[in-house]
Amino acid sequence: MKNELYNVVTGKDILTLSDEASNPLIEDFLFEKDYVLLVAEEKAGKTIFAQQIACCLTSGTPFLGSLDVPKPVDVWYFATEGKEDDLKDRFIRMSKGVDLNPDRLKLIPSRFRFNTREGRECLRALVNRYQDCLPKVIIVDALYRAVKGSIKEDEVVNDFHHIMGTLSHECDAAVILVHHFRKPTRDDTGTYVNRSDDDTFGSAFLKAAVDHCFWIEKCRKDSKDRILRCDTQRSGNIVDNMRLKLIQPDPLYFEAVSSMLEEKHKILTLMSAYKEGLSVSDIEFRSKIARTTIYRTLKELLNEGKIGKNGGKTKIYNIIRGEYV
């Protein structure tokens, strides 16, 4: 039952994974009941990115044009900063380039702190009000405005995680927290030190509690481009590096920029030698390409109509347009 404070797993169930463990909400990016942290420096577009996640989830259209969304789901978007009309304006401009189903989205401008009695009461009221259409994904943007107390304090952060864990459990939902980096630092020569998700502002428990942590950085050579990275992940099946281009101002959205020309050539050449087709495991073994990169490359090749797939649980991929040269 949803209101139980603990579970007891015994016998053969200890050795059995639930189906939900492998059910993607966004292929190679977000799975059911995931607890995710999205961080970026100021003006990197993390709110635009988070709103685009919401759009694609509600409409069931591919995220960033390349990551499948198997089915549309309901989303709650807690906006703890910014003006309501500004958020609406972003969704309006974004909807011109990315499909959005507003009937599946609850935009919730909020002025309460989640880890307070008032916050718990507000969350309880929302769950009771929408108990027949609870969300599958909850987005909190921005994290620092959702927490009472210093997010540098472990106890404060752990209390917030507990609240979000309870909300996730009651809604049977994945959670995405949108946060920011600490200020950049320079080395002895005055050069900015390279970023990583260790630069997340606040307690170390912010990152320690999540299933994976995405971070976005600006490209130095092109002000419109960003790099999406995921260095910290528990499952090993999350996209770990992706170049994005920001389309703005109207429409407003990110699109993936292919950086896998070499991987495409390698995989297509490999497939041309195996007419019967190859599984992802076969490709990984023979090509030595990382599995997450293989999935992304195959997705692009499928979208381009250069390969096909068939089979049951284990998919087999092969070239469908004759010999590859």
Image (tube, rainbow, N blue to C red):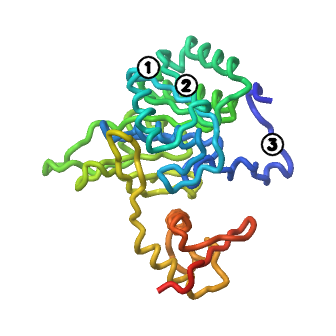
Say what amino acid the circle numbered 3 marks: Val
What percent of the width, then of the height, locates residue 163?
59, 25
Tag 2's secondary structure? helix
Instruction: State whether residue 208 appears in this view.
Output: no
Tag 1's secondary structure? loop
Query: Which quadrant of the figure contains the N terminus?
Result: top right
Seen as rendered, the residue at the extreme top is 118
Seen as rendered, the residue at the extreme left is 189
Q: Which residue is mark 2?
A: 159
Q: Is residue 8 left or right of residue 115?
A: right
Q: Which residue is mark 3?
A: 9
Q: Is residue 221 left or right of residue 276?
A: left
Quarter of the view holding residue 85 = top left
Instruction: State whether residue 59 appears in this view.
Output: yes
Tag 3's secondary structure? loop
Q: Residues within 10 Å of mark 1 (few under 14, many from 20)?
A: some
- Is there a contact, CB below 8 Å, between mark 1 and mark 3? no
Quarter of the view holding residue 221 = bottom left
